[in-house]
Image (cartoon, rainbow, N blue to C red):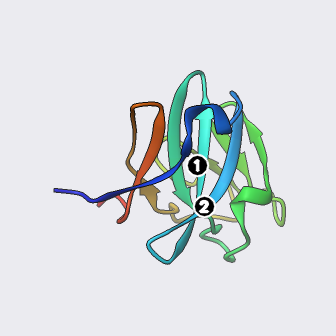
Amino acid sequence: MAEYVKVCGVADIPDPGKQVFEVAGRFVVVFRVEGQFYALEDACSHDGHPLGEGQLEGFQIVCPRHGARFDIRTGQALCMPAVRPTPAYDVKVENGQVLVATQPKR
């Protein structure tokens, strides 16, 4: 069973919006789009640049360094120069709190 840690309250992230947190020693960017929460490792799979500094466009985050795009729901790389996905994390909401899994999805 996955372990989760509380990162913030639901109201702390605007919709749409994003915020970076440290989860189990890793930086994770948590997104809120259309009332749902998603989380990715805060590193572009192309060169490691923080994705949390990028522009959120619908369900995509754009790496500010070279323009790689990732689907925030899955971590899938959508365009060059990134070809590998970035790790995605399960997110759940309990009692108005946002919780992120301590390990990425497999």
Query: What is the C-alpha distance between the residues marked 2 and 1?
Result: 7 Å
Q: Is residue 37 above or below residue 81?
A: above
Q: Quadrant of the N terminus?
A: bottom left
Which residue is at 65% across, 72% downward? 46
Front-most of residues 62 and 28? 28
Tell me the element at label 1. Answer: strand
Which residue is at 29% across, 61% downward? 106
Front-most of residues 91 and 93? 93
Kindly tell me whether residue 25 is visible in this rendering.
yes
Task: Give amino acid for label 1.
Answer: Val
Asked if the residues shown at circle 2 and circle 1 are in contact, with their CB atoms under 8 angstroms apart, the answer is yes
Which residue is at 45% across, 55% downward? 88
Which residue is at 35% across, 65% downward? 103
18 left or right of 4?
Answer: right
Q: Which residue is mark 1?
A: 30
Q: Which residue is mark 2?
A: 21
Q: Position of residue 97 (x, y in %)?
A: 47, 39
Query: Given the current orientation, which residue lies at the most extreme front position?
Result: 95
Q: Position of residue 54 (x, y in %)?
A: 79, 54
Front-most of residues 78 and 98? 98
Q: Position of residue 8 (x, y in %)?
A: 56, 47
Query: Given the current orientation, which residue lies at the most extreme right position?
Result: 65
For residue 51, what is the image quadrant?
bottom right
Tell me the element at label 2. Answer: strand
Query: Given the current orientation, which residue lies at the most extreme left position?
Result: 1
Q: Is residue 33 above or below residue 51?
A: above
